[in-house]
Image (cartoon, rainbow, N blue to C red):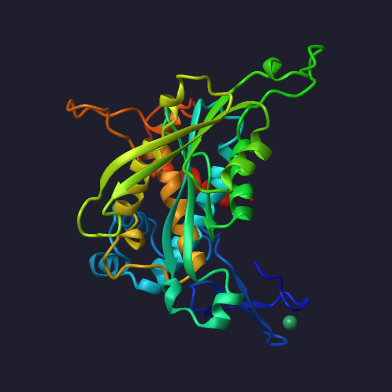
Amino acid sequence: MIAPACKHDQVKKHGHDRDGNQRFRCTLCGKTWIQCKPQGQLGPMRLPIKTAKLVLQLLLEGSSIRSTERITRVHRDTICKLIVRFGDACQNFLDMRMKNLTLTHLQFDEQWTYVAKKQARLTTTERENCYDIGDIYLWTCVDRKTKLMPSFLIGKRSADNARRFVKDVASRLVLPNAHSSDNHAYQAKDYEITVQVSTDGFAAYPEAVDLAFGPYVKYGTIIKDYKNASMIYTPSEMVGTQRTGRRGIDKGQEWTICTSHIERLNGTQRLFLKRLNRLTLCFSKKLRNLEAAFAMFAAYYNYCWRTRKPGKSGKKRPTAAMMAKLTDHLWGFDEFFDAVLRPATQS
Ligand SMILES: [Zn+2]
C-alpha cells in the first residue's frame, strides 16, 4: 500500500485504478492514494495463471507465438512479455540448481541461428558495432549418461564466448580441490581424472577446456566430414570421422570421443523452439527474447523432458534431473511452473 499522502484520518473510498486497486481520498485536503493488491506469481502481469500456463505449454511444445495467440486469444506482445518474465525466472532457477554436479562425459557444441536478420544482410556499421543481431550461436553442453544440460550460452561464435561458456560449465561441477591433501599432485599421473569432454573441431575449444578443467579432464575432439554438405535439402552423407585425443585419452580409447548426443539434442531444440526451425519464416527479433525462450526450454528439458531409450522399445528414461539426482520424482508442468516462480515471489 502506498502510504497516505497526509496525516488526516477522514478517509473515503475513491474508486479503483486501471489495475483494479482500491483508491482512497482524504475528505479534508483531497489527496488520493491507492492500496495495491499483493502481486501474484507473475508479478505485475494481470494474465490469469491458468492462461499463462496454457500459453507456456503451447510454446514449449513448439507452437509459434502467433499460433499461440490465435489459440489462447492472448495478445502476442503479452506472450513475449510472459516469455521474458518466465524465461528470466527459469534462468535463476537453473543457476540455483545446477551446482555441485557430478557428471561423467560432457559434450559441447554450438548451434547456429540468427537474430533480426542474417549476417549477410547487416550493414557495415551494424557488422562492426552490434553484438546482438546477425549470426548468433547457442552454446550448449550435455552429459552423455544423464542427458543433463548443465548450462548454455548465447552469443557470437568467438574464442571469448568459448572460454566463458566452458568455464561456466566447469564451475558447476565438483572438481577435486588442488592441494587439499598431502598428496601434492606434481606429476600428471597424480591428478584424478573426473570428467571426459568431447567437442567438435572449433579452434577455441582446446584452450578453453584447458583453462576451465585443467588437469582433471580427459579431452578429445571429433571432426566429421560430409559429402554434399552444401546441399541443404538432402541429408548429407558422412564420409569419415577424425577423432583426436587431446589430453588423457589412451591409445585405442579414441572411440569414446563422441558428440552424437549433443547433436541429437540440437535436433530437439530445433523442433521444440519454434524460433529455431530451419527453412521457415521463424526467427527471433530480439536477443533478449531468444535468451529467455532458450532458458525456458533448458529448464523444462532438464526437469520435465523424458528422452527415449535407444532401440525400438519406445520406452523412456527418467528426466535428466532425476538421472543426475537433482530430484527424486517426475515433475509435471504445474510443479515446474510453481518451482520456477517461487523464488521470484519470495524475494
Ligand atoms: Zn488530508
Comparing 98 with 183, the one in front is 183
For the point 76% across and 78% down, which residue is it? Answer: 6
For the point 68% across and 16% down, which residue is it? Answer: 189
The quadrant of the rendered image in which ligand 1 is seen is bottom right
- Is residue 117 left or right of 189 when viewed as pictured? left
| Quadrant of the image containing the N terminus | bottom right
- The total number of labels drawn is 0
Residue 302 position within the rendered picture, expressed as x and y whole percent measured from the top left: 43, 39
Do we see residue 51 in this rendering?
Answer: no
Q: Quadrant of residue 242?
A: top left
Comparing 122 with 13, the one in front is 122
In the image, residue 248 above or below residue 137: above
Residue 24 position within the rendered picture, expressed as x and y whole percent measured from the top left: 61, 77
- Is residue 343 left or right of 310 when viewed as pictured? right
Residue 211 position within the rendered picture, expressed as x and y whole percent measured from the top left: 68, 39
In the image, residue 250 above or below residue 114: above
Comparing 230 with 14, the one in front is 230
Do we see residue 223 in this rendering?
Answer: yes
For the point 27% across and 65% down, which residue is it? Answer: 279
